Image: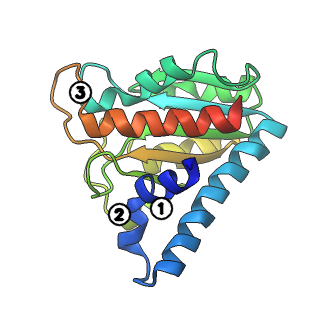
Amino acid sequence: MFLECFIKGFFCIYINKLSQNTKIVVNSIMSVLNELIQFLEEGRKQKLAIFCVGNILKADDGLGPVIAENLTGRIDSDILLIDVGSQPENFVSVLKRNKVTHCLLIDATNFEAEAGQIGIFEPGDLEDFQVTFSTHFLSLNKFMDFMETESGTKFKLLGIQPKDLAFGNSLSPEIEEAIRKTINLLVEHLK
C-alpha cells in the first residue's frame, strides 16, 4: 500500500526527532502527512503554486528542476508550477501577480538526515535542525520569511536531504528514490 510505504520511507527523519513510542511516532508522521495534504487542498481551493528550486549543475541540488519537469502535465493545470532555478527570491512578483495564497517549495535541504530523507517544514522550522548551508542567495528560512512578508503567501518546504552537491549532473540513487516518492505523492493529490 502506498501509505505504508510512505510512512516507512518518506518521513524517517521524524522518527529521530520524536518519542521512542512507535504509536506516537506513527501518529506524528500521519499528522505531518495530513498537514501537508491539507495545505495542498487549501491551496487548490484558492491559488496554489509549487516552486521547484535547484541547480542542475550541482548533482543532488538539481532535484527541484527534475521534479518540475516530471510534474508538468501531470497535475491540475490551475496549479502554478515553476522551476525557479537557484534564486527563488526573484519570483515574489509572480506570487503577487497570480494572487497565490499557498506555495509549496521543493528543494535540496540539509537538515542533518540521511541522504534522500524528506522533511516538511514551515518558516522558522529549519532553525531547529541547524541547517548548515544553502545553495541560494538567501537561506531557506530568510527566503520563506521574506516571501511571506512581501507576498502574503503561506509557505511550506518539502526538503530532501542531499548526498552530493559537487558540480555534476547526475543524481544520487537515494535522491532519485526521494524524487519518485515526491512525484507520486503530488500527482496523487494534485491531478
Q: Are marks 1 and 2 in contact (CB under 8 Å)?
A: yes
The answer to whether residue 121 is left or right of residue 80 is left
Estimate the spatial distance between the alpha carbons at disc 3 and disc 1, rounded to whole Å: 25 Å
Secondary structure of residue under mark 1: helix
Residue placed under numbered mark 2 in the picture: 129
Between circles 3 and 2, the one closer to the viewer is 3
Residue 156, numbered circle: none
Q: What residue sits right under mark 3 in the picture?
A: 59
Q: Nearer the viewer, residue 34 or 86?
A: 34
Q: Amino acid at mark 3?
A: Ala
Q: Quadrant of the C terminus?
A: top right
In this rendering, is residue 181 above or below 125? above
Q: Amino acid at mark 1?
A: Asp
Asked which colour scheme the image uses, the reply is rainbow
Q: Secondary structure at mark 2?
A: helix
User: Nearest the camera: 56 or 190?
Assistant: 190
Q: In the image, what residue occupies the spot 37% across and 29% down?
A: 63
Please state the horizontal and vertical placement of residue 169, each as a whole percent of the image: 23, 19
Q: Is residue 91 left or right of residue 132?
A: right
The numbered mark, 3 or 1, whose residue comes first in the sequence reads 3
What residue would you read off at disc 1?
Answer: 125
Secondary structure of the residue carrying numbered label 3: helix
| Image location (x, y in percent) of residue 93 | 64, 24
